[in-house]
Amino acid sequence: MEFFADYKTYVLHFQNIQEAYYLSAILNSSIPNESMKEFQSRGLFGARDVSKKILDIYYPKFDGNDPVHVKLAELSKSAHEKASGFIKDNPPKQELSAIHLGRMRTSLKKHLVKELGEIDKIVKGVIGK
């Protein structure tokens, strides 16, 4: 597997794969992004600085005994598998410029609309605790 680093790279170590899927569900939901809008900086083209501001949102620590946390981890795993299959079946036909990457992300989100909707509902409850 290849590894690419952008201008910033963060690393987080997990106790187990369920914890990683749990946090991935939260970070890929729309809820943290909506929650940080009021204190997010803005530039000429709108909101910016997501990479660091997203970490200012409260995320409950993963609890493997909490059925809601386990459900989020399971949904996240399912979404990852479905996304991987989608990318394998629909590889980029050209270099992923910003526009093509955006289109690919939009297609992928449409493909995962059911999973992302369910994740959003649960994350809204988890972050609100």
Image: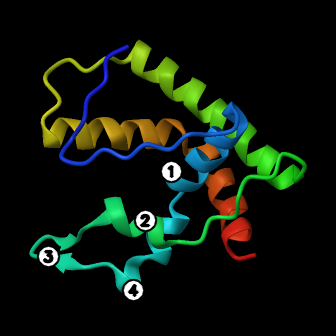
Single out the mark in the foreground, 1 or 2: 2
Residue hosting label 4: 38
| Residue 108 versus residue 82 in the image, above or below | below
- Residue 62 rendering spot, x and y as whole percentages: 73, 52
Question: Of residues 11 and 101, which is closer to you in this image?
Answer: 11
Question: Residue at 38% of width from left, 37% of height from top?
Answer: 107
Residue hosting label 1: 28
Residue hosting label 3: 43
Q: Amino acid at mark 3?
A: Gly
- Residue 9 rendering spot, x and y as whole percentages: 30, 44
Q: Residues within 10 Å of mark 1 (few under 14, many from 20)?
A: some
Q: Label 1: state its secondary structure.
A: helix
**Distance between the alpha carbons at the discs numbered 3 and 4:** 14 Å
Q: Are marks 2 and 3 in contact (CB under 8 Å)?
A: no
**Distance between the alpha carbons at the discs numbered 1 and 3:** 23 Å
Residue hosting label 2: 54
Question: Of residues 107 and 35, which is closer to you in this image?
Answer: 35
**Distance between the alpha carbons at the discs numbered 2 and 3:** 17 Å
Q: Label 4: state its secondary structure.
A: helix
Residue 77: image tag: none
